[in-house]
Image: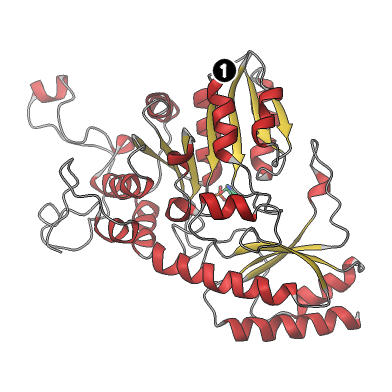
Amino acid sequence: MKSSKDDEQSPRLEPETALVTRGRDTEAQKGFVNPPVVHGSTVLYPTAADLHAHRGEFQYGRHGTPTTRALQDALKALEGPQCAGVGLAPSGLAAISTTLLAVLKAGDHVLVCDNAYRPTRNFCNGLLSRYGVETTFYDPFIGAGIAALIKPNTRAVVTEAPGSQSFEMPDIPAIAAAAHAHGALVIDDNTWATPLFHRSLDQGVDISIQAATKYIGGHSDIMFGTISANAKAWPVIAETIRLLGVCAGPDDVYLALRGLRTLAVRLNQHHRSGLEMARWLATRPEVSRVLHPGLQSDPGHAIWKRDFTGASGLFSIVLKPAPQKAVDAMLDSLKLFGMGFSWGGFESLAVPFDCSEYRTATTWAPGGPTVRLHIGLENVDDLKADLDRGFAVFNAA
Ligand SMILES: Cc1ncc(COP(=O)(O)O)c(C=O)c1O
């Protein structure tokens, strides 16, 4: 590959190829494969006339650099033809809060899935409520039934596909059809599948969000968020990013771009290893249920098969009823599964969780303690052996 200037004439490429080639301009990069990491605030203008007119490819560090442009171009190609623009934020949560502030105003109503990432709920119940926006939480399995919850002032519907603790899979095309019939925008937290496995903008979503901290970064070493929007939503997203002064640090922008180049190979491995571990866990006597939409037994399987091309490495298990101290003893005994709240890196993780602490539209009663697992890039036989030892401790506790 010699050069990959992103212009309208570029051929449509398969996602894996787009991930490797887009956002690269060999000539501008003086022959180097990667763009420079531009640390910059001031951009100098050659003449007073250019300065008065704000004329120039780049105008101010916060508004974009060659590094941010490279990442935005690559992400836009991955999101597909519906994507009109990609905004960059310093974390996944900042991408979510910026989006909600962009599309909502005092007096509006927003519908949010009951399995949403908890800080998303906190933002709605906290800041949005103080600013006069009302939130209603809905059952993530609601599908077309969402129409019954839409009010004249409903401006947006938030989905998470699937919920990142409990893994209910929403019917996004059905939700989007109902939302659009009433003029509401659909915002999807697509962090679990990434646009590689779920082109949410092709399925009626107007704004697709990534906590790029997870799989796009891929190495547990950055905080980053992206906001990809269609032509209808992009102007207000772009304007709000500018008004709020949202931008990301150059080193994290670069690391997100570097992560993106290997996203396909990593995510395909997470898919394979995750499914193998999920199937193995489903046979364990200590496990009563595996919450993974890629399993045929999962209530969201048909939707996953229809709308997704793969699964990532994140899913949960419900254990047979046992005291929390047995679960904690098991977690403490694991050598390869670390305990930590982010995910999407190369390493395996295990964390206990309890959705009943915050759910309001649905009841969370799984019938036993729940643990979320992230299956990393280790050998699956080693991971099984680690969990096997952990289950022995669980049984003995
Ligand atoms: C589904 C989901 N969305 C958003 C976020 C927020 O991302 P960040 O940690 O980059 O703010 C997370 C983080 O765990 C998440 O799991």
Q: Which of 183 and 314 lies nearest the eye of the viewer? A: 183
Can residue 192 be seen? no
- Relative vertical location of residue 283 with respect to residue 74 in this rendering, above or below: below
Q: In which quarter of the image is the N terminus?
A: bottom left
Q: Which of 340 and 20 is in front in this view?
A: 20
Q: In this view, does 88 lie above or below 178?
A: below
Residue beneath label 1, please? Answer: 105
* Relative to 58, 68 lies left or right: right
Residue 102 drawn at (x, y percent): 49, 25
Q: Is residue 68 above or below residue 207?
A: below
Q: Residue at horizontal 55%, vertical 83%?
A: 379
Q: In which quarter of the image is the C terminus?
A: bottom right
Occupied quadrant, residue 381: bottom right
Q: Is residue 367 visible?
A: yes
Q: How many marks?
A: 1
What amino acid type is highlighted by mark number 1?
Lys
Residue at image position (42%, 24%) is 236
Does dot 1 land on a helix, a strand or a loop? loop
Residue at image coords 42%, 55%: 196
